[in-house]
Image (tube, rainbow, N blue to C red):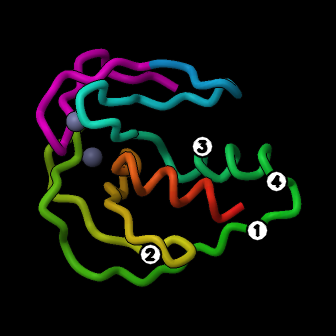
Amino acid sequence: MYRAQNLECPRCREVMTPFNNIINKRLIKCGACGGNWTTLAEFKDLLHEMSPEYELVLSTAVSGHGELKCPECQVAMVRILVDGLELDQCWDHGVWFDFEELQQALRLV
Ligand SMILES: [Zn+2]
Ligand SMILES: [Zn+2]
């Protein structure tokens, strides 16, 4: 998937660098605050590889707009619920995990 190379972290405004994590899913990580920018599809794949039996429960519940803006289009992201975790999502581009949110999400599996 194409990613612009110089996205700014929605949390702290540092420039983020794309990298491949240990199981080769494409994430963009902020080196300053540890946040991660990815897509829900990639996130689901990642959970699936870690735990094939795990079914991610995707809730459509949207709890309003958060304070973060999509690093790709600068539109305010919405807060969504994914298996009890509240995340920031841009419908067109991806989903943002704060460092602790990703750790929590990976602990679900
Ligand atoms: Zn950051
Ligand atoms: Zn966007």
Q: CA distance from mark 3 to mark 4?
A: 14 Å
- On the image, numbered disc 3 is attached to which residue? 42
Q: Residue 99 in the image: x percent, y percent?
A: 38, 46
Query: What amino acid type should be assigned to the residue bearing mark 3?
Result: Glu
Mark 3 surroundings: few (<14), some (14-19) or many (≥20) residues within 10 A = some
- Residue 5 drawn in magenta: yes
Which of the two discs, 2 and 3, labels the residue nearer the N terminus?
Answer: 3
Label 2 CB-ligand 2 distance < 8 A: no
Can you say whether 10 is above or below 18 in the image?
A: below
Can you say whether 13 is above or below 47 in the image?
A: above
Can you say whether 45 is above or below 58 in the image?
A: above
Q: CA distance from mark 2 to mark 3?
A: 17 Å
* Residue stretch in magenta: 1-18
The tag on residue 81 is 2
Q: CA distance from mark 3 to mark 1?
A: 14 Å
The tag on residue 51 is 4
The answer to whether residue 10 is left or right of residue 95 is: left
Which of the two discs, 1 and 2, labels the residue nearer the N terminus?
Answer: 1
Which of the two discs, 2 and 4, labels the residue nearer the N terminus?
Answer: 4
Query: What amino acid type should be assigned to the residue bearing mark 2?
Result: Leu
- Depth check: 57 or 12 in front? 12
Marker count (numbered): 4
Mark 1 surroundings: few (<14), some (14-19) or many (≥20) residues within 10 A = few
Query: What amino acid type should be assigned to the residue bearing mark 4?
Result: Ser
Q: Principal SS element in the magenta part?
A: loop
- On the image, numbered disc 1 is attached to which residue? 55
Residue drawn at the location 47% of the way across and 80% of the way down:
60
Q: Residue 54 in the image: x percent, y percent?
A: 79, 64
Which of the two discs, 3 and 1, labels the residue nearer the N terminus?
Answer: 3
